[in-house]
Image: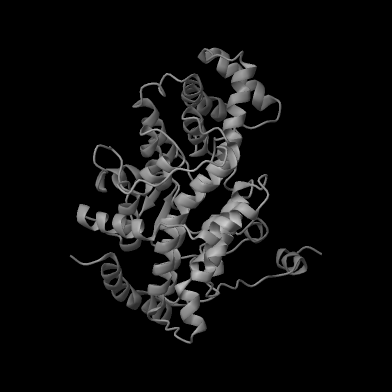
Amino acid sequence: MSTLKEVLKQKIDAHRPRTTRLVKECGDTTLGEVTIAQAIGGARGIKCLVTDISYLDPMEGIRFRGMTIPETFAALPKVPGSDYPYVEGFWYLLLTGDVPTMEQTLEVVEDWKQRSQVPEYVIDVLRAMPRDSHPMAMFSAAIVAMQRDSVFASNYAAGKFNKMTCWEDMLEDSNNLMAKLGPIAAYIYRMKYKGDTHIAPDPELDMGGQFAHLIGQCDEYKDVARMYFILHSDHESGNVSAHTTHLVASALSDAYYSYAAGINGLAGPLHGLANQEVLAWTQNFMEKLGGKVPTKDELKAALWDTLNSGQVIPGYGHAVLRKTDPRYTSQREFCLNTPGLKEDPLFQLVAMIYEVAPDVLLEHGKAKNPWPNVDAQSGVIQWYYGLTEYDFYTVLFGVGRALGCLANITWDRALGYAIERPKSVTTAMLEDAAGIK
């Protein structure tokens, strides 16, 4: 059996001529025009990034290596006794584009177990921070602290940089990071929220199951972790966390510097904070409805009151999607198939909003997409299982998002992508282009 690294090398060797030919023979081919609105409005919709890891289809949602979310969950090897796949097998898929066998998956499982010990100096860094520090600040600090162990940076400093093989060092760093991110996040959680009590790892568990174990969760939550990390892994390269990681890595920064930067972007309220904001809104909404699940007519009236007061319905709408987010659907199906959670009043409210809100938003006429996104559901699941610390939700997001970000920058180095350096223009130049005097 070929190892993950050997399979990845074969894929890289086959892919390099494709990008070389595109630049050499077709480099002047135009992909589209840039408008003033795009230049001022955050470069939205400008086709200027390349990734084969995932693609966001407006109608089908995210595709991982060409596979929809249902296809991905169906194809990957499952953890024994679970309907959900190994996160480690998903990592193999993101890197290679191939669905791994169980044997190939378990190779990654064992590899990450060997790498999962968190260095003591990282624990020292975390314990030196004020306990009221935001968990994302702690998470970022822990990641950048481990930069001292970067194989990529060490070899570069020693004059061993080779643009044809440096991806191997990036892969080594990425595997080390992926193996440690769950235990680091769990340590932060127990230190901040659970009286600084900690749980020894279980050597039999996979990455998702181990995370659930380390934060003190029930067996059921192991599938929540597996599902959550896969669903939040990647969303093309243009979102803030993925793009920031790619941008910093383009300067030949190692995986630690690059992903710490991506985590800092994810911490922004307009990016990773949405799930906790949706949960807070839903809880407040239920309180206004008398603390009970309303009838559909009562809910419809309350939603109209919300819109007429100038507020939005959080968790609904998406910059690209024009259908229900499949990540929402996957989590909804988990809830519907989980006794207890299916009867939870908060979930029942979320489920009813899903039935009522789209029609209200369509009638309202201002939403480009009246369907729910991933954030409309995820916080409710965490709350049900007793993970009620809002500030930690983005750390969960960050553990999962590393899968896509680190797979992308490994391929960036394999294909020798250049340092990213867009050209700026002045406001006066824009006014001249628009004919404004």
Residue at 68%, 25% (x, y): give it. 308
Residue 161, placed above or below residue 64: below
Residue 155, placed above or below residue 68: below
Q: Residue furthest right?
A: 437
Residue 411, how many percent across, how many down? Answer: 40, 68
Name the residue nearer the viewer: 369 or 330: 330
36 to the left or right of 247: right
Name the residue nearer the viewer: 134 or 231: 134
Quarter of the figure with the N terminus: bottom left
Residue 171, how many percent across, how many down? Answer: 39, 68
Residue 348, how many percent across, how many down? Answer: 47, 21
**Residue 224 picture quarter:** top left
Q: Residue furthest left?
A: 1
**Residue 21 picture quarter:** bottom left
Residue 62, how many percent across, how many down? Answer: 41, 48
Q: Residue furthest bottom?
A: 159
Residue at 47%, 57% (x, y): give it. 118
Residue at 38%, 45% (x, y): give it. 210
Quarter of the figure with the C terminus: bottom right
Residue 85, placed above or below residue 104: above
